[in-house]
Amino acid sequence: MVLGSLYSENGPPTELADKMAEATPKFVAKLMHQRIMPKLAELDKDILDGVRKAGFQTTSGVDGSGFIMRMFY
């Protein structure tokens, strides 16, 4: 959702897309991720439910900027 158009068939070459993606300051990227995480969690609900059912624990991170999955034995 954040960089999808960069990495599409109609996007720029991968080398240029990588440079464009990394040109975004990390604190700005983090703010963008925090903003879209609730929507991504909604869209990925079935996937997240499945990995939880398989024994993984999930979290959106301490700052809400991304999914983290860990397997506990």
Image: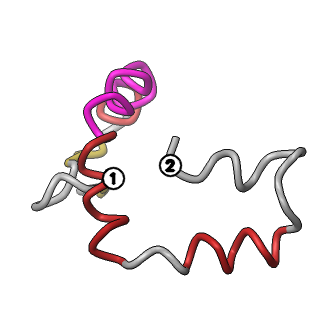
Residue at 39% of width from left, 78% of height from top?
25
Answer few, some or many: residues within 10 Å of disc 2's Cα (few below 14, many 20 plus, some between 14 and 19).
Answer: few
SS of the residue under disc 2: loop
Does the magenta segment cover residue 57?
A: no
Q: Name the residue under label 2.
A: 2
The kind of residue tagged 2 is Val
User: Bounds of the magenta span?
Assistant: 37-49
Does the magenta segment cover residue 46?
A: yes
Q: Which of 21 and 49 is in front in this view?
A: 21
Q: Tell me: 14 left or right of 26.
A: right
Q: Tell me: 12 left or right of 38.
A: right
Mark carried by residue 15: none
Extreme residue toward the left, this view: 62
Mark carried by residue 33: 1
CB under 8 Å between callouts 1 and 2? yes
Where does residue 13 sit, x and y in percent of width and height? 88, 67
Quick check: 48 above or below 42?
Answer: below
